[in-house]
Image: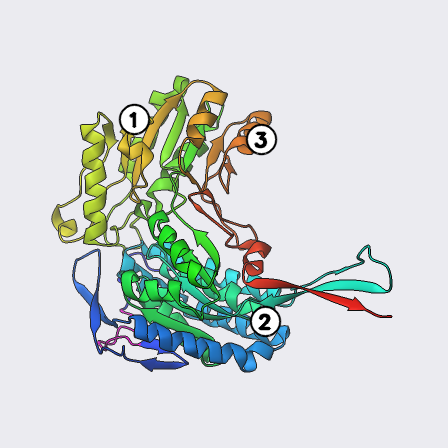
Amino acid sequence: MHDRSATPARPAFLDGKAKKLFIGGKWVEAQSGKTFGSVNPATGAALDEVALGDAVDVDLAVAAARRAFEGPWGSMRPVERQKILLRIADLLEAHAEEIALLDTLDMGAPVVISRYLASNVIGDTFRFCAGQAVAIQGETMTPSLPGDVFAYTRKEPIGVVGGIVPWNGPAFNATWKIAPALAAGCTLVLKVAEQASLSPLRMAQLCMEAGLPEGVLNIITGFGETAGARLAAHPDVDKISFTGSTETGQHIIRASAGNIKKLTLELGGKSPDIVFADADLDRAVPAAAMGVFGNSGQACLAGSRLFVERGIYEEFTQRVAEFGKSLTVGDPLDAGTQIGPVVSKEQLDRINGYLAAGASEGAVALAGGVQLTDGKLADGYFIPPTVFANVHDDMTIAREEIFGPVISAIPFDEVDDVIQRANDTPYGLASGVWTNDINKAHKVSSRLRAGTVWINAYSLMDPAVPFGGYKMSGYGKESGTHQVQEYLNSKAVWVQTN
């Protein structure tokens, strides 16, 4: 167990030297020689300097990935790829504390959350994908044609992949791109978020230590409008796998038209979490609360539209508010902290704008509602868990993705009514249903237009279960057997034997 009173040591990776790009198995400076600063959101203080990669650096990384794909990696046996993935999993778990601390320092997630992800989810995902590496199969078929004819399909790696990840879970999101791409036999250029670049860079070191050939994984740090845009439009990139905002996803779709890239897009959400009067409220209260407050609300799947049946609306929303007030907000390096800062001053200002909009449109804050600026929190970017009541469907806070610890609690009366209102959004990423009526649970879940429905739970994730959205929440899947298939092409081969 970790000592709750001890302050974790500063990771050795933060050695005071500017972090370089990782291209072709080597650490190189950006061609421009420029760097940019990484900031600790808990204190507002400078954390490290990172290479400012741009289009020319992306070109070099893509060329390295192409060479690796057409070299030994492209002909490596599946079992050899599997062994490398398993070694990566072991090394990542052996360095879980370091990776967790890098994430916490860089983007503010409470260290208890970062440790859980680094110690469990990341390694499990690599191991799941390692199993998939040796389970890639085609099929045979008998066409309805005269003569001795049969056909079969081959599953082949799509080629060079561009991965673009957000800042709200740096190591976890990097894993979601790296592990399936490698399992499928692809090579990868990973553009990491400028707000949180450090843990993916450290992961690249460990991947090389595990025996990953040079050029198979490349890491670019920099800004979306330069490095990210070049990667999305690059003519020698065969696929983009992107996690981030819907707006950026639309830019990537347009950029992909140049060479008709294959796309996986996991985008924004405004997910409904529906609580019926017959639900187990003791279970629903903390789960519905942490389905939004976890990671300071910086999660695309957050159940930020909390629909509550009218008969229990007042009781339930008040209980969620009291739960939010009970959570410890503070230094994310403290093992007792449950809510850390949001990632940046820009994100802080954005959320503050939504808090002001909620109040001005008539919503009532039962908890939170105002930035925390007292004492040790004064220099950081802290928003308390916030519960707005008296929310109507057309309010700004009920329509737009806030990406902060803000719940909009909305009453409903009838099953059909709440289903219609829950679906009345351009998004369709996730949803929740709370009821002890199994018939009602299945009826509602079958009619919700969302890629994931949790029944009597929220935010459960596992490497074996696919995750992805409907509508403007994107297309394609992360996790599950579906995930590796996203990195493969299917080829039909015809054979006439007479």
Instruction: Tell whether label 3 touches label 2 (CB within 8 Å).
Output: no
x, y (%) of residue 229? 33, 62
What secondary structure is marked by label 2?
helix
- Can you identify the residue that label 1 sits on? 391
In the rendered image, the vertical position of residue 372 relative to residue 488, given as above or below: above
Of labels 1 and 3, earlier in sequence is 1
In the rendered image, the vertical position of residue 76 relative to residue 151, given as above or below: below
Tell me the colour scheme of the image: rainbow
Of labels 2 and 3, earlier in sequence is 2
Q: For this view, does 478 lie left or right of residue 330?
A: right
Q: Residue furthest front?
A: 146
Instruction: Tell whether label 1 touches label 2 (CB within 8 Å).
Output: no
Q: Quadrant of residue 361?
A: top left
Of labels 2 and 1, earlier in sequence is 2
In the rendered image, the vertical position of residue 127 relative to residue 109, given as above or below: below
x, y (%) of residue 283? 45, 34
Q: Residue at x 42, y 27 (%)?
A: 421
Would residue 323 be seen by someone viewing this image from the given angle?
Answer: no
Q: For this view, does 432 lie left or right of residue 134?
A: left
Q: For this view, does 264 lie left or right of residue 389?
A: right
x, y (%) of residue 443? 57, 28
Q: For this view, does 462 lie left or right of residue 491?
A: left
Would residue 251 be seen by someone viewing this image from the given angle?
Answer: yes
In three-dimensional space, the C-alpha distance between marks 2 and 1, rounded to whole angstroms, equals 50 Å
Magenta region, residue range: 10-20
* Residue 442: image tag: 3
